Image (spheres, rainbow, N blue to C red):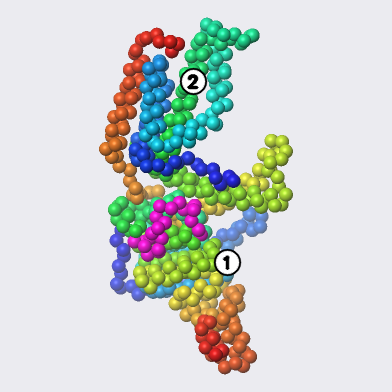
Amino acid sequence: MPPFIFTNILSLIDIKNLIVDFEVADADGVALSKKRVLNDITLSIDDGEFVSILGKNGSGKSTLAKCLNALILPTSGDVEILGLNTKDEKNLMSIRQNVGMTFQNPDNQIVSSIVEEDIAFGLENLGIETEEMKARIDTAMRSIGILDLRNSMVSKLSGGQKQKVSIAGILAMKPKIIVLDEPTSMIDKSSRVDLLNTVKYLNEHENITVILISHYVEEIMYGKRTIVLNDGRIIADDIPSEILLRKDILDFAGIDMPYIPKLATELKNLGKKLKGNETKVESLCQYLK
Amino acid sequence: MIRDITLGQYYNRESVIHFLDPRVKLVATLVFLMSLFISTNIFAYAFATLFLAMAIMLCKVPLSFILRGLKSLILLLLISVVFNLFLTPGETILSFGILHITREGLIIAIKMAIRLVYLVIGSSILTLTTTPSKLTDGLEKGLSFLKAFRVPVAEIALMMSIALRFIPILIEETEKIMNAQSSRGADFDKGSIVDKAKSLVPLLVPLFVSAFRRANDLAIAMEARCYSDSVSRTKLKPLAYKGIDYITYVILFLYIMLIIFTRYIKIDVGIM
């Protein structure tokens, strides 16, 4: 399947008035009622962007991610990827090939016991020939930096390594967009930084559009744009350093402001001559000098 | 602890037998098992012994490792030998009170013992020299003719390999749940069999719940990676016969012919 090339479309992802309702059972598990999970989302994402989607549990961020590759279809409204509507069954394979997605639990998304064989899974589904498959696996493993794990048993890997294997697995399918649904929530801190740097590298050097779903506010600094969701609505869409300083938005989304901007704001409130937009240790030190 | 249990007891060595195509090894095991049950006289058993000895030598797995599989068989072996020895009617050669050992009983008991032991050794050589994933591949390709009868061979093979993938995860999970229950006073070892069985309920229920949740997650992840049962999938490591595989098929054919041939040798050697 050749990669899709469209020159006449402006954005890679185009979401218009997206509404998603889930049917939920009550406490007895009998009566069904409708719950609106995504409420009138309109959004467009361009080629090469690195967008973080921030929100607390139940804000609809995972549902939004699943709408991007047709795992969940809109109740009303449209989701178009590269101009292909997710509602059209014919587009399903090309949408899923172009929108690679990884999930929260690294164990529950790896199919084979051997690293190399798992990376091959998506390619086997696409019907790629063996030689081409080997070359693509090589390239994908090199970009992620896990070439040495090729023949390892998946059960012997750490959580961070498993997440890298799943990213390599979708990267081998040559997607335009990768959607990472809370990739760091089940791995330790040092692997977290390592993983996000790898993702940033892919975005900058391989021109892959990245959508990072997260509930850690620290992680949005890796991206260039942040969207904050609350109760199924977009409540902010801005560059990360602006979002970090908007205490009202962070409070609304139930997220703690990170330490440095918090300190800067508090100092400013005390009457110190701060700009109030210091988000990094260095800029704050500059002031304290 | 229980994590040390390995399914399929693969023993990594560089040997001709490790190198063979899994389909050849499956057929070889099948042929060997068949040969054991059509063996009637001492010549057939001698050939079978020779064949097995060659396989053991070629696979470079230590003999003690191969024989380990027999441990679990001892009880079954003992029961079948004792029953055959004393309960087969015929010409009595030894008597202990009311128990009589008959000539026919002795022959059947010896044959049965050899068959069982060879059977276990033969199939352990297969699992010792073939990784579970290769075995699955071999079964998938070897049974692919069943697709004509609408048997979903590829899907079954994928299910088997996913099951293998999740065994270590579920074992780890069982340990976690056991520890959680033990820390709250559960005891899995005390009491009668009924008590023990009852104590497994609080272990199995959360294990099943979690297994279903994992299955659901995995299904979504597979779908996201373009899995669909309606398209034909390609393979990263397609199985292809090499020279040595054809040679092995020829050897197998000659062997089974030889065993069949021995049935027509009419001689009265010893008790066989």
* Mark 2 residue type: Met
- Which residue position is annotated with label 1? A58
Name the mark on residue A137.
none
Vertical comparison of B257 with A18: above or below: above
Residue A100 lies, in percent from the top left, at: 41, 62
Residue B151: tell me if it is visible.
no
Please tell me in which quadrant of the rendered image residue A44 appears. Answer: bottom left
- Which residue position is annotated with label 2? B112
Chain letter behind tag 1: A
Taking the spot 30% from the left edge, 42% from the top edge, the residue there is B240
Residue A153: tell me if it is visible.
yes
Left or right position of A240 against A132? right
The quarter in which the C terminus of chain B is drawn is top left
Residue toward you, A259 or A123: A259
* Mark 1 residue type: Gly
Left or right position of B201 against A123? right
Residue toward you, A45 or B63: B63
Residue toward you, A68 or B117: B117
Taking the spot 61% from the left edge, 52% from the top edge, the residue there is B176
Residue A180 lies, in percent from the top left, at: 46, 65
Q: Main secondary structure of the magenta part?
A: helix
